[in-house]
């Protein structure tokens, strides 16, 4: 169902305090001179979103289409940063349901696209050219720890919705093949299921999803046909090992040995990972460093929270990293991995619930 654009009832513009700093440390830091991260970014807090246009100021857009007590559960910026997809709860005669909207960033109008969708991190993904939005619709398949969800795409040019894979349990972490021909996603859960975790591939033509790589989550396509992903052995809960997945579904670790590291994204042709620091208090929040794990490993950033491409608390596009540090008053940082230049998008203590980057 595609509805007519619904004007936002009110829109509050606010310049946020923006602090610009260059990150350098002894033994860890960028290898290129300072350069401010470009591109667009967005993050959600309470019932509104904060949007930073390419090189511009950050503004707050209040979305009155959402129930304020629940907030926004998912965000995705289309390439170019002119359309923002978001999911949130709305009230109706049956109570509340999660719906999918598109926000036209320049005009501030919204369009309600689908109802009863699955909200949360990793459930919205734009195709590389920005024509299609992949999302999931919650489906009841009978008794289970969590609801199942079916995979759909929305064509913003034709204004049409199409289901491209059947409902599956524990289905999430959507992304796309680099050529835009298929949606890549995870089926299974290391935490809640004893079954293997698989990476699936669902072509845009609607022929259905097929299993591609076993016991791995492939989360970020690389420039040479390989995917950056993670393997989480059962004997190491809460750990993880960053891997590369080939076109044949076979994987290999990035680092020899039993190294704990989580996939972040790519910096040019090199994979980037998060590695935990040694902490004396096992109950404390895990913090660590950002590393390039290529042929010549090097440290880029130190003392950041646990980051991974599938947690929803970070995003990476074209060498730019956006992440939230809840231990530091919910600070949102936009970082150029190449230069270390950082912009802190101050959120005045409102802990963000979702993040998105555009190119």
Image (tube, rainbow, N blue to C red):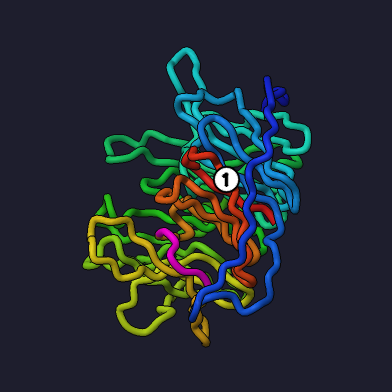
Residue 254, by quadrant, is bottom left
Residue 129, x across and y down, in percent: 72, 55
Task: Tell how many labels.
Answer: 1
Horizontal placement of 80 versus 273: left or right?
right
- Which is nearer the eye, 109 or 234? 109
Q: Is residue 258 magenta?
A: no
Q: Which residues lie in the magenta part?
A: 300-305
Residue 51, x across and y down, in percent: 66, 42
Q: Which residue is mark 1?
A: 346
Residue 289, x across and y down, in percent: 44, 69
Residue for point 39% across, 41% down: 148
- Position of residue 355 relative to residue 240, above or below, is above
Residue for point 46% across, 69% down: 302
Residue 333, by quadrant, is bottom right
Residue for point 72% across, 47% down: 53
Mark 1 crowdedness (10 Å alpha carbons): few <14, some 14-19, many ≥20:
some
Furthest residue to the bottom? 295
- Position of residue 68 relative to residue 24, above or below, is above
Horizontal placement of 40 versus 70: left or right?
right
């Amino acid at each position: 169902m595609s509805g007519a654009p619904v004007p936002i009832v009110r829109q509050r513009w606010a310049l946020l305090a923006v602090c610009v700093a260059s990150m350098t440390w002894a033994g860890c830091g960028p290898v290129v001179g300072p350069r401010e991260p470009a591109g667009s970014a967005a993050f959600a807090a309470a019932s509104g979103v904060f949007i930073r246009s390419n090189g511009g100021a950050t503004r707050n857009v209040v979305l009155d289409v959402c129930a304020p007590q629940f907030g926004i559960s998912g965000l995705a910026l289309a390439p170019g940063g002119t359309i923002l997809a978001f999911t949130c709860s709305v009230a109706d005669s049956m109570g509340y349901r999660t719906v999918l909207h598109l926000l036209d960033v320049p005009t501030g109008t919204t369009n309600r696209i689908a109802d009863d969708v699955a909200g949360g991190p990793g459930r919205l993904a734009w195709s590389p050219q920005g024509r299609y939005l992949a999302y999931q619709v919650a489906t009841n398949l009978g008794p289970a720890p969590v609801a199942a969800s079916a995979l759909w795409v929305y064509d913003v040019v034709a204004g049409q919705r199409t289901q491209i894979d059947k409902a599956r349990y524990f289905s999430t972490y959507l992304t796309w093949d680099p050529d835009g021909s298929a949606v890549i996603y995870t089926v299974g859960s290391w935490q809640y299921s004893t079954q293997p975790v698989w990476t699936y591939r669902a072509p845009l033509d609607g022929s259905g999803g097929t299993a591609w790589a076993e016991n791995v989550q492939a989360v970020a396509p690389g420039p040479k046909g390989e995917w950056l992903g993670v393997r989480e052995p059962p004997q190491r809960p809460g750990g993880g090992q960053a891997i590369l997945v080939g076109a044949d579904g076979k994987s290999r670790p990035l680092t020899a040995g039993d190294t704990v590291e989580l996939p972040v994204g790519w910096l040019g042709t090199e994979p980037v990972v998060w590695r935990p620091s040694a902490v004396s208090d096992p109950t404390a929040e895990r913090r660590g460093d950002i590393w390039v794990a290529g042929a010549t490993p090097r440290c880029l950033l130190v003392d950041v929270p646990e980051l991974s491409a599938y947690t929803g608390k970070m995003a990476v596009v074209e060498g730019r990293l956006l992440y939230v540090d809840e231990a530091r008053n919910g600070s949102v940082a936009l970082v150029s991995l190449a230069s270390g230049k950082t912009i802190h998008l101050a959120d005045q203590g409102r802990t963000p619930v979702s993040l998105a980057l555009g190119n």
